[in-house]
């Protein structure tokens, strides 16, 4: 893929929200102060119907990015060529600024677990993922963003930390990163590592987007639910990331217990406030 180092990252889009069905009409009627929207790719890969009707109307007003949950880049199954064909067709239709998915596996032997399963962080897994990312990028004709997932288990076979694995995938496959700040916090709590150490290990020139979300604290562990407001320690970690990476396109996820749009707009304003304060402070070396 012919890309120069100078063109690794696109200009930041600002502050966005996930496009969700309950908000379609409100967005069209009120045109809220949202800089961009992220869509779940799989929701719009069926030809026709209301989802595409609304997406076509909203994309005429706002920049759009695509975010998938079914690529299964880490699976030992062959890449799903039919899925990639549909993904590329959707991208050609709506012209997203970028396409992302997760650094994980979602099934094996054609069984979909409908969950984002963590990988063993081994040299073998690294080579496997890097090769598959190269294939996907060649098919799509663009760089892919990979997102770090939240996790609740680890593998005794792992030979490196998650952040080293993510960094090496991005550098060796020449792809980009969607850094989920909440997922780093959740996994740090569950596995006992310092979330700031994770952020500080990620190369600045590979992070195209941030995710922010809420979760449920069960006492001994945290579940990444995307159905609660963002908590103060995640806001603080977001500020730390902003001081390291500078302005990065930031998006708030809410996938369940979806409130009225005004509540999410208030949370988006909080992200803007945190960003203004973080950028007024010295950068992290």
Image (spheres, helix red, strand yellow):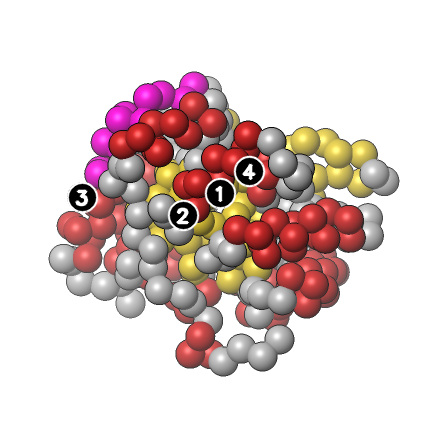
Label ID, residue 273: 3
* Tag 1–tag 4 contact (CB < 8 Å): yes
What is the quadrant of residue 127 in the picture? Answer: bottom right
Horizontal side of residue 33 vs 150, given as left or right: left
Label ID, residue 60: 2
Magenta span main SS: helix
Give the spatial CA distance, label 1 vs label 4. 6 Å
Is residue 238 shown in magenta?
no
Horizontal side of residue 155 vs 12, given as left or right: right
Give the spatial CA distance, label 1 vs label 2. 6 Å
* Tag 2–tag 4 contact (CB < 8 Å): no
Instruction: Determine which residue is flagged by label 4.
Output: 52
Q: Give the range drawn in magenta.
A: 257-270
**Mark 1 or 3 closer to N-term?**
1
Give the spatial CA distance, label 1 vs label 3. 31 Å
- What is the x, y in percent for residue 97? 46, 57
* Tag 3–tag 2 contact (CB < 8 Å): no
Give the spatial CA distance, label 3 vs label 2. 28 Å
Graded by Cα atoms within 10 Å as few (under 14), some (14 to 19) or many (20 or more), the crowding at tag 2 reads few
- What is the x, y in percent for residue 231? 31, 31
Give the spatial CA distance, label 2 vs label 4. 12 Å
């Amino acid at each position: 893929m012919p890309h120069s180092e100078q063109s690794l990252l696109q200009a930041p889009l600002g502050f966005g929200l996930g496009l969700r069905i309950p908000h379609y009409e409100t967005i069209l009627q009120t045109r809220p102060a949202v800089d961009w929207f992220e869509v779940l790719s799989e929701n719009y890969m069926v030809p026709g119907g209301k989802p595409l009707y609304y997406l076509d109307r909203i994309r005429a007003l706002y920049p759009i990015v695509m975010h998938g949950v079914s690529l299964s880049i880490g699976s030992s199954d062959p890449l799903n060529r039919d899925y990639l064909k549909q993904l590329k067709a959707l991208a050609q239709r709506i012209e997203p600024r970028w396409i992302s998915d997760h650094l994980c596996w979602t099934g094996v032997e054609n069984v979909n677990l409908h969950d984002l399963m963590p990988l063993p962080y081994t040299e073998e897994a690294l080579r496997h993922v890097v090769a598959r990312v190269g294939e996907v990028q060649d098919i799509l004709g663009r760089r892919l963003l990979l997102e770090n997932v939240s996790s609740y288990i680890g593998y005794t076979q792992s030979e490196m930390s998650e952040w080293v694995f993510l960094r090496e995938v991005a550098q060796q496959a020449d792809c980009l990163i969607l850094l989920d700040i909440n997922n780093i916090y959740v996994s740090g709590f569950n596995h006992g590592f310092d979330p700031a150490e994770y952020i500080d290990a990620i190369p600045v020139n590979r992070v195209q987007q941030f995710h922010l979300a809420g979760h449920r604290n069960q006492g001994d562990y945290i579940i990444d639910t995307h159905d609660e407001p963002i908590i103060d320690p995640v806001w603080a970690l977001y500020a730390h990331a902003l001081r390291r990476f500078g302005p990065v396109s930031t998006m708030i996820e809410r996938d369940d217990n979806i409130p009225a749009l005004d509540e999410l707009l208030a949370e988006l304003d909080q992200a803007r406030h945190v960003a203004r304060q973080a950028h007024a402070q010295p950068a992290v070396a």
